[in-house]
Image (cartoon, coloured by chain):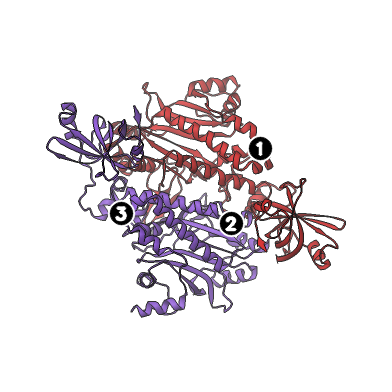
Chain colours: A red, B purple
Amino acid sequence: MKTISIGEVDQYDGEEVIIKGWLFNRRSSGGIQFLQIRDGSGIIQGVLKEGSVDSDLFEMALDLKRESSLVVQGEVKRDERAPIGYELEVSDISVQQSVKDDFPITPKEHGPGFLMDHRHLWIRAKGSAPVLRVRHELLQALREFFDREGLIATEGPILTGVSVEGTTTLFETDYFGEDAYLTQSSQLYLEATAAALGEVYWIGPVFRAEKSKTRKHLTEFWMAEAELSWVEHDENLDFQEKMVHYVVNRVVDKRRDELESLGVNTEALVKKVEKPFPRISYKEAIEIVNEAGIDMNTGEDFGAPAETALGDHFDKPVFIEAFPRELKPFYMEPMPNGETVYAADLIAPDGYGELIGGSQRIDDLELLEDRLDEEGLPRDPYEWYLDLRRYGSVPHSGFGLGVERTIAWICNLDHVRETIPFPRQINRIYP
Amino acid sequence: MKTISIGEVDQYDGEEVIIKGWLFNRRSSGGIQFLQIRDGSGIIQGVLKEGSVDSDLFEMALDLKRESSLVVQGEVKRDERAPIGYELEVSDISVQQSVKDDFPITPKEHGPGFLMDHRHLWIRAKGSAPVLRVRHELLQALREFFDREGLIATEGPILTGVSVEGTTTLFETDYFGEDAYLTQSSQLYLEATAAALGEVYWIGPVFRAEKSKTRKHLTEFWMAEAELSWVEHDENLDFQEKMVHYVVNRVVDKRRDELESLGVNTEALVKKVEKPFPRISYKEAIEIVNEAGIDMNTGEDFGAPAETALGDHFDKPVFIEAFPRELKPFYMEPMPNGETVYAADLIAPDGYGELIGGSQRIDDLELLEDRLDEEGLPRDPYEWYLDLRRYGSVPHSGFGLGVERTIAWICNLDHVRETIPFPRQINRIYP
């Protein structure tokens, strides 16, 4: 007899099969038991009828606790009323492990602290597993997009001697007697590989020892970063726009069931990412924020309420350009006025904040040296980065997309901690 | 006029195009200059004839130093003698940056220290850029394989409170007042996500603060790890064998040019990964090693010479099974004899050593608790891991493939440091 996964039951209508999985939930009604069985690829309802199966089996099944592991044999039956269109008429169950204690995650509401302490079990729940499948799909969609555009996948190191985003939020480690830091971004390294390989990307973990405890921050999170040789500011935004449009459509296509199980209005989501995305200046953005009744002055960064106001105003992703250079890191190309830089943040609708930060990078050696000096950064650890401006410097641009925020936005979640299997927050290193 | 990449010149035979790139190398012969231009996607020879172009242009081009960045206009011409089958008859050059100093990496031999100090530039060289393209392809091939097999991509955290491979080789960091470690493997976490999602994988960076300075070790390296629910030892090996066969063939198909430019005999490589791979016990392996004249006793681990002897003996990847349990971590399933465990290492031919380490994991709670105690490991940080044996434990297996060693083997390289853009070794955190 064939062992199949629940995701492929539609190919076995009317056949007797074996499914290996876990008892997700159950109910009984008179002489019938309905066992929800999950195997990672989906959930199927197994139907056990008194009299149709051995009575010992029927009794035994009544005692099975949630998350018991089972090898279930039965006939796949088409059933329009079933969420996946099929049920399993169970003929036999072999119990791998009969769980002794009640599974800690119950359908009732739990506090976030309890759920986070049980994250290793919580990921099996109805609200969690679909999010992790969406995560898988988003990462695949990003890679697929980059590959189609001819980019080469590459990596920066996690352990570095340099800081990309400022020195106050670095995790440090002793590296055989030297100080090393966990990377905040692979950007500087990708600039080097872009000069070797043309256009490059990486998707990997980055770290910020930020003390902020918000629903948009993790200390360890994943970025999708790209660096594009010979690409200037506007083209950089075109690329990002095309990417967001592509990946959202791809995820909706492939994971419609999961998204709908999470209550996402996929039609509205697809409409929101129709191109083009508005592009407004930092100055215009402040006006919109002020009109929304939020106090904010030139020279300040956008806080969460300001980002929400911008998202509400456009109801789709919006690029904020032309930031004052004091607000941005040293490596960003100044605009002709000298005051603002060729940077852009992509702000999500629905209050999810900054999804992407990007900029054209300075390609002139002297200008870059001056900016390092202005920021009081030492030259030595950046010598290799300066070399990129000595040997065949070209105009180039890049960006980093926050993977967790993008998933939170797509899945319409309250907190980024739900988008990654094992989130790390200021007070959270376990499990 | 169309700007194209060198990788797509075959679509533009006879057309006037623009190529943006870097001057890779050059030679002159009388009234002709041959400019090797690279753009990351390939290298094309640009031909500049005195008299056919403006004389100022011809003179200017004579002064261009290597790695100058150029926008080159010219006609694509079919030429059988050219390595890529085409040349560019140059009509104009616009110089983006004329490099002032000689490019540090010259075609002559450099010492490894010098090359590593200039890694950010070395990656542009003939022996390096193709390796990084092979790396890209191997990672794609692995993902493609896992996806076809129905696995879901997931992640373990980098920052953890637990040790997987022993406590002596951990990088530590202060995590807001708590001790945290950089992960040595995501295995334990993947076991949790496998119970939620069925079969899972991740490809990401892991860390070992090993003081060993060998050609097979980095302190930061990438692993491709998979965990398979309901899979036992033999099936685990079948899966790995299928994977290695698939990815090597895929890389050879897609990157034959790069591999051949590195001197790889692709035909021999493909032959070596024909299935099945031999499977021998630890005991049998020792006999083979001893027969090769290498002193090694039961209870010892295979050193580099022993691994080389095993590779030479079979001239293809070979699984070593049934290791004494004292040699392996606490979580491996004992064999019925109680002395050995259901573990296997896949040893590469040609002296490249261990490519994969894998095992069936203990699924019985008490046995796992006993093994933790035996190893003197504390229970608390592993409570969540023990929970996986309390709630729906199933037989399951997994493995980790060392990405850098696999690339070194495929590309026939002397040292793993050449397989990753910015290698980290005991004395190396820069660039």
Mark 2 touching mark 3, by CB under 8 A? Answer: no
Count residues near mark 2 (Cα–Cα under 10 Å), then give few for <14, some for 14-19, many for 20+: many
Amino acid at dot 3? Leu
Q: Earlier in the sequence, mark 2 or mark 3?
A: 2
Cα separation, mark 2 vs mark 3, equals 36 Å
Q: Viewed as shown, does residue B393 lie left or right of A27? A: left
Q: Quadrant of residue A138?
A: top right
A19 vs B166, nearest the viewer: A19
Disc 2: which chain?
Answer: B
Which residue carries the number 1 mark? A264
Which residue carries the number 2 mark? B199
A375 vs A56, nearest the viewer: A56
Q: Are marks 3 and 1 on the same chain?
A: no
Disc 1: which chain?
Answer: A
Cα separation, mark 3 vs mark 1, equals 50 Å
Amino acid at dot 2? Glu
Q: Viewed as shown, does residue B278 lie left or right of B423? A: right
Residue at the left extreme, as displayed: B30
Q: Secondary structure at mark 2?
A: strand
Cα separation, mark 2 vs mark 1, equals 26 Å
